[in-house]
Every structure is written in structure tokens, then in C-alpha cells.
Amino acid sequence: MEPITEHHSSDKAVTVDSKVSLVLLRFTGEDRPGLTASLSELLASFGCLIIDINQAVIHQSLLLGVLVQIPAEQDPDRVIEAMQDRGESLGLRCKPRHIHDGDYDAWVDRQGKSRFILTLLSRAVTAEQFSAVSSMLAQQGLNIDVITRLSGRPPRIPTSKLTRACVEFSIRGEPRDKNQLKASLLELSSSLELDLAWQRDDAFRRNRRVVAFDMDSTLLQAEVIDELAKEAGVGDEVIAITEAAMRGEIDFDESLRQRVSKLAGLSESVLPIIAERLELTEGAERLLTSLRRFGYRTAILSGGFSYFGEYLKKRLKIDYVYANELEIVDGKLTGRVTGEIVNAQRKAELLQSLADAEGVDRKQLIAIGDGANDLPMLARAGLGIAFHAKPIVRQSAEHQMSTLGLDAVLYLLGVRDRDLE
């Protein structure tokens, strides 16, 4: 479905004279260039005022709705008949509807209601997914104003290439039960293999400026310390500690010291070898390239190690890196880290420092991570995303993504696939 462009009278005050007629004209038919121009030209000849307009094209089929104010000196029936005749000559069907004063006043009163964006992410949007999401919105008493497809058109014949699909709902109203809404979003995400992101549609949502990433299991598919441990022959021991730390079962500082201590004696020559074999997460390169193109500032805030953060900084052209420093003496790891440990609290502090350095509001920050030590950072950001995260993180974070790659973050910013072509 093509994006629907909608202009509301909330953009400018409109006074409707009770002596004039308000008519909604709905046109349907085969789309082609010049239709809207021809119809609006006829409306102009009658001196009509356009109160609201909404147009969409779905697979070459035009859907056009125009709410017009007909001047008092014009005969409404004559205007309607002329518009129907013009539509017929263009191959369009026109259905008119008179709007009564009470209906119009109720429409105007809805201008002050809150607006939200619900983003549906999936490998392919199914009718079951769409039905479940729209039913959930209806149960919350929310009205869908606009539905937009952000993802590109899928090929007719499936290929081996990973697909991604995204539909964005523009919603008006306040949820009846915010806690139930969040529970429903989580339940639908887990049961229907999709991700749902709920954001307030305000100026900050459209003006994010800084994006901070966790590194291990976020930008990278692996946990680097586990790769180091394999080289040191203590892989199973360190992996067990890592998993417990990511689940929040062990204090991060202590778990880091325990794991690094087992690396004592490992040659620093293995660091570049490990760096070269590390695999980026799906969509990471596309996301970073796009963010840089759009003028975002990017950072790595990691409980991992600075050597690998600097490697990614160069590879992905990231602006800032903050991570832990492995102590190396005589070409070997000592089993210690130097300086202040980048733990959960430190990540949140660094994120705020980035906001201060870049001169942006906290709500303009995006933070993305997967572990329990990322939660304070996610909570401080205007948009905090738990990416392919552990259960405790998914339940606690405001937003979570587990279906698509990192580049799906672009959809949460309202970026369409065609914007990147």
C-alpha cells in the first residue's frame, strides 16, 4: 500500500459558516496522472474551501476523500452533480455525503487528542498479525487515522534473501489501560513472530540525533570475551559466567573481573585475529551507513573491550567509543582491566554525557542493547530498544526488537526503504 498523505485542519484554524454546506466527496477508480488536478480545478471554479483531504493509491487503485466547504452563494446539489459528472468523465466513481454540524464539531474536538505511532515489524505481514494488532487497538478505544507501508515491495517469487516488512499505524486517542496495552504488545510479539513499537508521536520522535549501541551481541553477533576465553582454553567457564551476568544473576563488575582473570597469560597477538573473524549483526552496516548519511552521531557504550570497539569505530565510522581497557604487560594479558569499569550505571552516565556534548535533549537519544547491564541506558534514552534481548530485558525495556536485523531501527524513525535507494 502506498503511504497515505493526510492534512488536518488542526494545522490552521478554520471557521465554518452555518450557512454554507460541508460535503465529503469520496472518489474511487483507476489511478493515473492528472486526476486530482482536474477535480481540484472544478472545486476552485465554485470557490470551495478544502477542509480536509486524504489520498491513497493501492496497486493503481485511487482512494481520494475531500471534505469541502461550499460557499453560501453556490447550490450544493449543483456542485455535487458537477463533481460526479467530472468524476465519471475521468473514470471515477464519486460518493457524496453531507456532514452535519454536530458531526463536524465532534471531528474538530478530536484535534486535541494524543497521537501515537505503532510500528509493526515482521519478515512478512500476515492477515493474522494485522487482525490481532487492529483488534488490540480497538479494544483500547484507539482510532487508526493513517496506515503506511514503510518497507519495499516484496518480490512475487520468494528468494533465499532475508525479507523484512513494516507497517506504521498513526493512532489518535489515549489507551484505556496502559499496562494492559504493554502486556498485549509483548504477548502478540511473542505469539505471532512480530515486533511492535509504541511511540508518542511528538517533535522528539521525529528529531532523534544520537544513537548509542552496546557492542557484544548487539553490533556483533558474538560476546568477545567468550571468543577470547576460547583462545585461552577456558571457554566453557567464561561462557557460563557471561550468561549469568547477562541474565542479571551476578553483579556485572564482579563477573567481569572473574572472566578477565581467566585470560591471564593470553598473548595480545590473538586480538587482531579475533577482531577479523567477528561477524556483524544482520543490518548493522546498513543502519550505521544510513544514520551517518542522515547526520546522526553514533557511539559504542560497551562493557566489552576498547580494542574491539576501536576496530568497529574504524570499520563502521562510529563517532565515539567507551569500553573497558584490557591491561597488557610484555605482550600478554594480565587478567585485569584498567580504569573505571563501564558497567550499567556508567553506560547511562556516558549516554547523558553524549547528550550534553552534542547539545541535544535526552528524548533525542536512542540506545540499543541486549543485556541486563543495558537497562539503565535504555531507560534514560528517548527511545530505548532491547535488541534480541534476554527475557528479563525484554520485559523491562519500553521497546524490544527480536524479529528483524538492526536496520529495522530505521523504521522506528519513520524511514522508508525507498528513502535509502
Image (cartoon, helix red, strand yellow):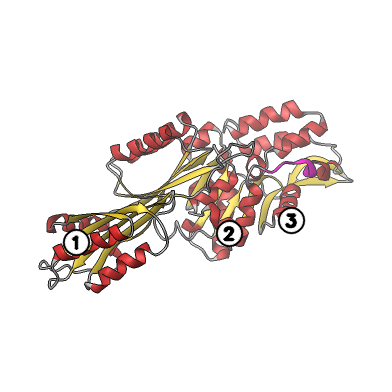
Q: Nearer the viewer, mark 3 or mark 1?
A: 1
Question: Label 1 sits on what residue type?
Answer: Glu
Asked if one can make out residue 345 in the rendered structure from this viewpoint, the answer is no
Quadrant in the picture for the C terminus: bottom right
Cα–Cα gap, marks 3 and 2: 19 Å
Q: Which residue is mark 1?
A: 81
Residue under the point 85% across and 43% down: 268
Q: Is residue 64 magenta?
A: no
Query: Gap between marks 3 and 1, in whole Å?
Result: 66 Å
Mark 3: few, some, or many residues within 10 Å (few <14, many ≥20)? few
Say which of 73 and 138 sits in front: 73
Please indicate, yes or no, whether residue 320 appears anywhere in the rendered image.
Answer: yes
Disc with the residue nearer the chain's start (3 vs 1): 1
- Which label's residue is closer to the chain start, 3 or 2? 3
Q: Is residue 381 above or below residue 158?
A: below
- Residue 32: image quadrant is bottom left
Residue 27 place in picture, x, y as percent: 29, 55
Using residue 6 as the reference point, say whether residue 389 is left or right of it.
right
Proximity of marks 2 and 1: CB atoms separated by less than 8 Å = no
Observer-nearest of 33 and 216: 33
- Between the C-alphas of marks 2 and 1, the distance is 61 Å
What residue is disc 2 on? 354
The magenta region covers 274-280
Residue contact at pointers 3 and 2, CB within 8 angstroms: no
Q: Circle 2 sits in a helix, a strand or a loop, which is it?
A: helix
Q: Secondary structure at mark 1?
A: helix
Which amino acid type is marked by label 2?
A: Leu
Expressed as whole percent of the image width and height from the top left, the position of residue 6 reads 35, 59
Q: From the image, tell me which residue sits under label 3.
A: 314
